[in-house]
Amino acid sequence: MSATPQNTDNQELDLSQISRKIGEFFEGISNKIFKGILFIKRNIVWVGALFVLGLGLGIYLDKTNKVYNHQIIVTPNFGSVDYLYAKVDLINSKVKESDTLFLRDVVGIKNPKSFKGIEVEPITDVYKFIENKTQNFELIKLLAEDGDIKKIVNETLTSKNYPYHLISYSTNGLTSDEATTKPLMAFLNNSEYFLKVYKEYNKNITIKMAKNDSIISQIDAFLNSFNNTVNGSQKSDKLIYYNENSQLGDIIKTKDALLNEQGIHRLELVNLDKIIKDSSITLNIKNTKKINGKMKLVLPLFFVGMFIFFSFLKRYYNNQMAKIKV
């Protein structure tokens, strides 16, 4: 069924109206751009002055207000993970309260006014979490059966038990080990309870190592005696065989196990000499996030933008007042 002449005329009318509105839209944009150019031309002195002022002030602020990030990789020993996080939260709360007396007198930070904030987060390392710890491996397997493994390894319950944690803090201007890092670590390691645990733990390791050394000496004496007996016997020209189940083989295995245990204990004495053990310190990483170091770009645009905004606001006010008077 063919379209009637009236329907055809209506379609042509609709298309012409759409075409006209599109043309008016683009013409409106063109007019606004032209008015903007005229506005800048009329106020070129003000726009130029504000741009130069913002540029100069931005350069000055970028040079004087430099923010630096600092990082410390630590290992909380003796079950002190929650203690570490509580201490860091305490420091951060004092920073937010601008409690410079606490930061200077209690924590020991040399220039507390420049200290901007601190946080701690676990370093995700599943392999270290399950290394030589069968129970941790079984825990990960059990949790993974009922959920996403990626989510599990990053959730607070699991991640807080990772061996390494990253302490991050920032300062206005450069800092040094003496000014911030050493006072922070001294504050974090100041716990009467964990100091007692630390002393007892290291005392137990020392006693265990002494006993292991005594057993190793006894084994060495026995092996030397056995060797002398064999060399002095009439059968010394014959080979002596023993299998893994023999008493001599068990003794040699015991000595080997004790030597490995002694090596582990020596490493423990190195890694467990503090409640919160720092293993890596990186200072003075320039912060370029957000607007840090970009004020020479931000301020000129901000000043010019505010000038344009208030100019149009003033124009709108005058137009509305004129309408009211009429």
Image (tube, rainbow, N blue to C red):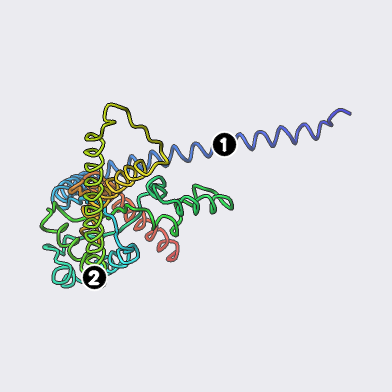
Q: Amino acid at mark 2?
A: Lys
Q: Please state which of the two labelled residues, at mark 2 or mark 1, is closer to the viewer.
A: 2
Q: Residue 245, image x and y in percent?
A: 42, 41
Q: Residue at x 26, y 41 (%)?
A: 226
SS for callout 2 = helix
The answer to whether one can see residue 238 in this image is yes
Label 1: which secondary element: helix
Q: Where's residue 52, x and y in %?
A: 18, 45
Along the viewing direction, whichever of 296 and 95 lies nearer the viewer:
95
x 22%, y 43%: residue: 225
Residue 239 x %, y %? 32, 28
Number of residues whose C-alpha sits closer than 10 Å to that of mark 2, classed few (under 14), some (14–19) or many (20 or more): few
Q: Nearer the viewer, residue 289 or 240?
A: 240
Three-letter residue code for mark 1: Ile
Residue 169 lies, with reference to residue 189, above or below; the image says: above
Give residue 22's mark: 1
In the picture shown, does residue 100 fall above or below 257? below
- What is the quadrant of the C terminus in the image? bottom left
Position of the N terminus, as image quadrant, is top right
Residue designated by label 2:
196
Residue 85, by quadrant, is: bottom left
